[in-house]
Structure formats: C-alpha cells, structure tokens
Image (cartoon, rainbow, N blue to C red):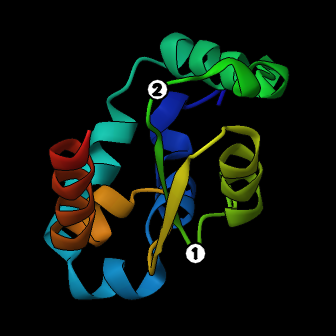
Amino acid sequence: MEQGGTAAIASGVLQRWLTAGYIEQNPAVAEKTRGMIASTPSRGYAASAAAVRDMDLRDSLSRIGAPVLVIAGCADVSTPPAMAEEIIGGIAGARGAFLEAAHLSNIEQADEFNRLMLKFFEAA
C-alpha cells in the first residue's frame, strides 16, 4: 500500500469484504464499495488496520452486561465465524446470527441484516 495507496489494494479488499457471487450479481454496488476503499486516505486505512490488528479485548467480554447481537458472515475471511463464536461465547446472554455473506453482511444481506437489527432493538 506504500506505493499506490488504497487504490492499489481496493480490489483485493473488496474480494474479502464481498463474496464473488455478490460482486458478479451487483456490479454497481461492488464498484461503489471498491471506490470507497480506493478513496480512503492511506494513512487512515493503515492506522485503522493496525488498531484492529493490535486490539485484543477478549478478556473484557465477560464484563459486558448489555444485550448483544453478533451478526457475522459465513464467508467472512477478515473476521471469520469462529471469531464471532468466541465473542458470543464470551458474553453472557449474547446471541448470534450468521448470514450467507462475507465481511459486509449489511450490504450483501441488507434485508435480513436489518430485520435482525430491528428485532434485536425491539426486544432490548
């Protein structure tokens, strides 16, 4: 990314964030998402990636007392379902939902994602 900025990595990131099938069936949304990645300032993207990489809050999960819904994509290679399972298991009463999507399940499965969120908020 040092040469070419986020534009140089945008297509690769897109392939981790959306499934190939979704990209093929929704080229306009995929291109808009790729453009968003490509236009992100490189320093900000790198700093955010480093913060996520270095952050490990698993020891804090048991202190969460609020209702929690973890939504994960079954095809997410950035934060795989096993990570979601670990989060769910670490928070008393947490619930989980796994959608047929990659990292951006809120885009790939927008209707189901929104339905789950509304149901969660109505119950909270």
Percent coordinates x, y for residue 60 in the rendering: 76, 18
How many marks on residues? Answer: 2
Q: Nearer the viewer, residue 32 or 95?
A: 95
Percent coordinates x, y for residue 98 in the rendering: 50, 71
Q: Judge left or right: residue 18 versus residue 3.
A: left
Percent coordinates x, y for residue 106 in the rendering: 29, 57
Q: Quadrant of the C terminus?
A: top left
Q: Is residue 30 visible?
A: no
- Which residue is tagged 1? 74
Mark 1: amino acid: Cys
Q: Is residue 25 above or below residue 91?
A: below
Q: Nearer the viewer, residue 123 or 23?
A: 123
Which residue is at a point 66% across and 50% down the rendered structure image?
88
Mark 2: amino acid: Ala
> For residue 119, what is the image quadrant?
bottom left
Q: Judge left or right: residue 44 versus residue 27.
A: right
Q: CA distance from mark 2 to mark 1?
A: 25 Å
**Disc 2 element:** loop
Q: Is residue 29 visible?
A: yes
> For residue 61, what is the image quadrant?
top right
Q: Is residue 119 above or below residue 10?
A: below
Q: Nearer the viewer, residue 85 or 46?
A: 85
